[in-house]
Image (cartoon, rainbow, N blue to C red):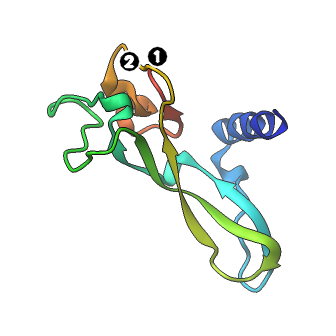
Amino acid sequence: MRRFLGLAVFAAAYAQDPECLPEPIPGNAISGFLATFAAANVTCNRLGGFSPLPDEPGFTPDCIANEIRYTNVGTDYGATPTTGPGDMLDLVVTNLTNYIPNEPFRNGRTAEQTGEFGQVNM
């Protein structure tokens, strides 16, 4: 619960001021995890087997997995401070129970796939 609350607070702060993200300063060590949907790409948008139609925003023609995959949604700098570039991370959203979206094209990102937040349509 603490992690979710921390992520929600981070998302709210980022929504008000995208410049609040800490940027690594060359030569200075950084550790931890930095996440932002603003730089992420939705490379698979087929949660529960439901995909947007080819003429709708968010359609990913090469996707066959039943998931939403956000590529480059974050950078992991590790627990030990480092001056390195960190590892780029993907976020994969899958369903464990029955999932039927109202409008599959609304999955992925907000604002017709150009927004700065991830979105799952219910």
Viewer-closest of 45 and 26: 45
Q: Are marks 2 and 1 in contact (CB under 8 Å)?
A: yes
Quadrant where the image shows the N terminus: top right
Identify the residue at horizontal 53%, vertical 46% (top origin).
Answer: 37
Identify the residue at horizontal 35%, vertical 38% (top origin).
Answer: 66
Percent x, y for residue 62?
A: 21, 50
Viewer-closest of 51 and 74: 51
Identify residue type, mark 1.
Met
The answer to whether residue 99 is left or right of residue 85 is: left
Identify the residue at horizontal 21%, vertical 29% (top origin).
Answer: 56
Q: Earlier in the sequence, mark 2 or mark 1?
A: 2
Residue designated by label 2: 101
Above-or-below relation of 66 to 91: above
Viewer-closest of 21 and 82: 82
Above-or-below relation of 15 to 36: above
- The furthest residue to the left: 55
- The furthest residue to the top: 102
Percent x, y for residue 63?
A: 26, 47
The answer to whether residue 1 is left or right of residue 54 is: right
Q: Residues within 10 Å of mark 1 (few under 14, many from 20)?
A: few
Identify residue type, mark 2.
Pro
Dot 2 falls on a residue whose secondary structure is: loop
Above-or-below relation of 64 to 52: below
Q: Residues within 10 Å of mark 2 (few under 14, many from 20)?
A: some
Q: CA distance from mark 2 to mark 1?
A: 5 Å
Above-or-below relation of 47 to 73: above
Dot 1 falls on a residue whose secondary structure is: loop
Viewer-closest of 65 and 110: 65
The image quadrant of residue 14 is top right
Residue designated by label 1: 122
